[in-house]
Amino acid sequence: MHMLEPLTRGPAHATAQAPAVENLPDLLLIERARSGDRRAIEALVRRSCRRLYRVARSILPDADVAEQAVQDAYLAAFGDLTRYQPNGKFAAWLTRLVAEQAHHAAAAGRARSPADSGPPGTTAPGLERAVDALPEVFRVVFVLRMVEGIGGVETAASLELNETTVRTRLYRAQRRLAAATGQRLTEANNLFELSRERGEHLVQRVLAQLP
C-alpha cells in the first residue's frame, strides 16, 4: 500500500512492542484519530492519498481540482469519523467519499483543463490521453484495478458496484485501450501519479484545516 514518507522518522529505538504510529493497522489509527490524535490522522492521510488522488483524477481532468476533491473528502471523513462503520475497509469508504466530492466538482464545472498527472516521463502521453478518453465509469474501474492494483471485491465496495459490473467495465476499458494504443494494457503503474511535492502539499493542507 502506498504511503508518503512521514515528515519526521520515529526514534531509532522503536521496537516491535511499540511500533511507530504510521505502522499501526487502520482500525487502531482510526480509534486514535477519533480521540484527536494528529499523528494518527496524518498516518491515515498519507496511507491513502495516492489512491484517492488517482480516483479523483480519473473523474476530473484538472489536477488542482482533483487535489481539492481529495482534501474535501478527508475533511468530511475526519470531521465526523463516527460515520465510518468498520464492516468494510477504511480505504473503500474514503474512496466513496472522494468520488462523491469529485462528482460535485464536475457538476459545478470546476474542472478547467487537462491535468499534469505526474513528473515528466512517468507515463506515455498517448496512454494518458487514451485513458482520459474512456467513459468515466470505465476509467475509474481501470484506475483502481490496474493502476492501484486493488482487488475486484474491494473495487466493487469502493464504487458501490457488484463484482460482475466491475469485471465487465474493466474488460471494456482494456478493449478500448487496446484499440486506441495498439496493445493490450494489463497495468499502468505510473498513470495519474501523485508527485511527492503535490502529495506533501495535500497532507499539510488537510492537517492545517482540521480543527
Image (cartoon, rainbow, N blue to C red):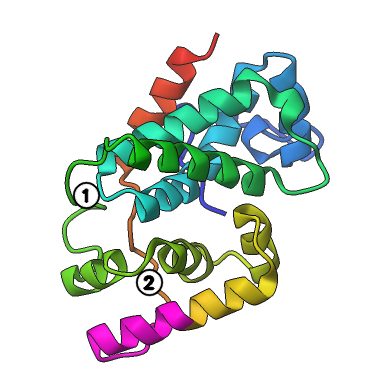
Q: Residue 198's x, y, as percent?
A: 30, 37
The quarter of the image holding the N terminus is bottom right
Label 2 sits on what residue type?
Answer: Ala
Q: With 77 as the anchor, is 131 left or right in this view?
A: left
> SS for tag 1?
loop
CA gap between label 1 and label 2 equals: 17 Å
Local secondary structure at mark 2: loop
Quarter of the picture holding the C terminus: top right
Mark 2, other Cα within 10 Å: few <14 / some 14–19 / many ≥20: some
The percent coordinates of residue 163 (x first, y second) are: 68, 71
Q: Which residue is mark 2?
A: 188
Q: Residue furthest top?
A: 211
State the residue at coordinates (78%, 33%): 28
Q: Which residues are magenta?
A: 172-186
Q: Nearer the viewer, residue 136 or 147?
A: 136
Q: Residues within 10 Å of mark 1 (few under 14, many from 20)?
A: some
Q: If you read the primary sequence from the N terminus, does the residue marked by circle 1 or circle 2 appear first?
A: 1
Q: In the image, what residue occupies the spot 34% across and 42% down? A: 106
Q: Residue at x 53, y 29 (%)?
A: 74
- Residue 192 versus residue 82: which sits nearer the camera? 82
Residue 136 drawn at (x, y percent) = 40, 61
Asked if one can make out residue 10 in the rendered structure from this viewpoint, the answer is no
How far from the left and from the top, in percent, is residue 142? 46, 69
Up the image or down, 104 lies above or below 59; here it is above
The majority secondary structure of the magenta stretch comes to: helix
Q: Which residue is mark 1?
A: 115
Q: Nearer the viewer, residue 78 or 6?
A: 78
Residue type highlighted by circle 1: Ala
Give the left or right position of residue 11, taking residue 131 as reference: right
Between disc 1 and disc 2, the foreground one is 1
